[in-house]
Every structure is written in structure tokens, then in C-alpha cells.
Image (spheres, rainbow, N blue to C red):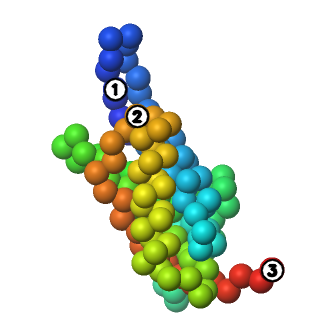
Amino acid sequence: MSIEIKNKYGHIDISTEVIAAISGGAAIDCYGIVGMASRKQIKDGITELLGRDNFSRGIVVRLEEDEIHIDMYIIVSYGTKISEVAHNVQTKVKYTLDQMLGLSIDSVNIFVQGVRVTTP
């Protein structure tokens, strides 16, 4: 699946996996994020921490009637205010995709899959 952009110079196709990779990179840079989680949680509730190469497994990009919606599954650091971390991720992802790809994102939905204690 891809997003098509037409301008006076021609036609551009952007894959949803590219959007997911850029979104994941932007989210990881936010304070309070330990990493991305797989959107398919194991039955006993253990979350899998994803590496930088598989951000697309923790992010869903949905196209609905010319609107772009992003669902992100994250793991936050213990002791941080989850609502602030989620808001920062939403803001940064929307800004980054607008600056890099010129896309207007309609919603960034955050699903917190776990809390981890980070050791220095």
C-alpha cells in the first residue's frame, strides 16, 4: 500500500513502510520512550521490544478516505508522565512527517504496551 502525491513535476508514491520507519525514528528520539513494541502482544502479556530495523511491526499506517492515521505501540520509561510522553510523540511524529514528506497526518494514536525500568 502506498500514498500517491501528484504535482506539476510528476507522480510520487510513498510506501506506508517508509512512513512507519520515519514515524518510529521520530518517536524513539522523544524523552521517556524506551522503544517500540510489537502490535501483536504475546498472550501472557509480555511485550517484545523492537529494534530500529523493525519499526514497521510496531506501527500501523491506515489510509481512510484521503486521511492518514498512524497507530503506534510504544514502551515508556518508568517514572515518566505517560500522557506527556504520548503527547510529545504525537507532536513530533506529525511535525517530522510534515517536514520530511509534506504529509498532513490526521491522527497519531498511541498505545502504551508496557513500562520498563531503565538502568544507567
Instruction: Return the mark for residue 120.
Output: 3
- Whether residue 63 is visible here, answered yes or no, is yes
Q: In the rendered image of this protein, does residue 91 appear above or below residue 100?
A: below
Residue 3 image offset from top left, x and y in percent: 36, 35
Q: Earlier in the sequence, mark 1 or mark 2?
A: 1
Q: Is residue 33 left or right of residue 86?
A: right
Disc 3, SS: loop
Could you tell me if the residues under marks 1 and 2 are in contact, i.e. CB atoms within 8 Å?
Answer: yes
Q: Earlier in the sequence, mark 1 or mark 3?
A: 1
Q: Give the residue at x 41% y 27%.
A: 13
Could you tell me if the residues under marks 2 and 3 are in contact, i.e. CB atoms within 8 Å?
Answer: no
- Whether residue 17 is visible here, answered yes or no, is no
Picture quarter with the C terminus = bottom right
Circle 1 packing at 10 Å, graded few (<14), some (14-19), many (20+), is few
| Pick the front one: 51 or 78 | 78
Q: Give the residue at x 49% y 46%.
A: 96
The residue identified by callout 2 is 102
Q: In the rendered image of this protein, does residue 106 appear above or below residue 72?
A: above
Instruction: Return the mark for residue 5.
Output: 1
Q: Give the residue at x 63% y 72%.
A: 34
Q: Amino acid at mark 1?
A: Ile
Q: CA distance from mark 2 to mark 3?
A: 37 Å
Residue found at the very far right of the displayed protein: 120
Q: Give the residue at x 61% y 86%.
A: 78
Instruction: Return the mark for residue 50.
Output: none
Q: Amino acid at mark 2?
A: Gly
Q: Is residue 106 left or right of residue 22?
A: left
Disc 2, SS: loop
> Mark 1, mark 2: which one is toward the viewer?
2
